[in-house]
């Protein structure tokens, strides 16, 4: 059974210090809430590389393949023989392939963003406080009941204004 703590911070520096202190003490399951994205928090958390670029790559490759295929299929199905030139030439079809690559790559990126961010989110997020959308910063730490006191002490030492129990 896990339990959680919610810590509220006024200053960004104290929040970053709290994140680093939690990582130093081997607390791995925590969520950070901020009113605006800040690069200091991202550097402190060190998130893994996003999988969105795979959606973009696969979508772009499928798009360019489809763009070339549809152009070549169209010219083979309705051939227009002009002066002995090749029916299907890849040079003019590069424009079509590129445009379809951009279209399908962009659409697959948006699709991937929705899938990976789990939008829409039906259930309420644990540890969220409406103050975190205004001007406060927050951390929700999920841990076992045995390490709850250690997590609370770590958060208070780092400058948390308020630490409350959740669950």
Image (spheres, helix red, strand yellow):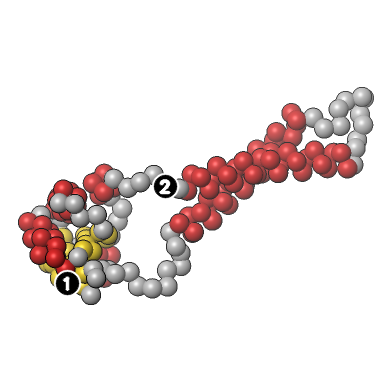
Q: Quadrant of residue 133?
A: bottom left
Q: CA distance from mark 1 to mark 2?
A: 31 Å
Q: Position of residue 34 (x, y in %)?
A: 27, 59
In the picture shown, does residue 160 fall above or below 56? below
Q: How many numbered marks appear?
A: 2
- Residues tagged 1 and 2 counted as in contact (Cβ below 8 A): no
Write down the quadrant of residue 8 in the picture. bottom left
Question: How far from the left and from the top, in percent, is residue 165?
Answer: 17, 72
First in residue order: circle 1 vs circle 2: 2
Q: Is residue 112 left or right of residue 30?
A: right
Does the image show residue 165?
yes
- Secondary element under disc 2, as helix, strand or loop, is loop
User: Which residue corresponds to the image point at 30% horizontal and 56% vertical from the top-left?
Assistant: 36
Residue occupied by mark 2: 50
Where is residue 157, by image quadrant? bottom left
Q: Residue at x 88, y 42 (%)?
A: 77
> In front here: 12 or 4?
4
Image quadrant where one finds the C terminus: bottom left
User: Tag 1: Cα neighbours inside 10 Å, few (<14), some, or many (≥20)?
Assistant: some
Quarter holding the N terminus? bottom left
Residue 40 or residue 63, whichever sits in front: 63
Left or right side of 123 for 98 = right
User: Pointer 2: residues within 10 angstroms few (<14), some, or many (20+)?
Assistant: few
The disc label shown at residue 165, or none: 1
Task: Identify the secondary structure beneath mark 1.
Answer: strand
């Amino acid at each position: 059974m896990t339990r959680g703590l919610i810590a509220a911070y006024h200053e960004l520096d104290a929040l970053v210090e709290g994140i680093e202190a939690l990582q130093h003490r081997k607390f791995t399951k925590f969520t950070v809430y901020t009113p605006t994205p800040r690069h200091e928090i991202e550097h402190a958390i060190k998130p893994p590389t996003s999988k969105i670029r795979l959606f973009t790559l696969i979508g772009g490759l499928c798009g360019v393949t489809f763009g070339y295929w549809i152009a070549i299929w169209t010219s083979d199905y309705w051939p227009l023989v002009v002066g002995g030139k090749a029916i299907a030439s890849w040079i003019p079809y590069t424009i079509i392939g590129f445009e379809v690559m951009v279209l399908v790559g962009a659409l697959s990126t948006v699709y991937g963003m929705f899938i990976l961010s789990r939008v829409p989110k039906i259930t309420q997020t644990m540890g969220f406080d409406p103050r975190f959308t205004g001007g406060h910063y927050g951390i929700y730490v999920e841990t076992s009941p045995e390490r709850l006191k250690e997590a609370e002490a770590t958060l208070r030492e780092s400058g948390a204004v308020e630490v409350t129990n959740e669950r």
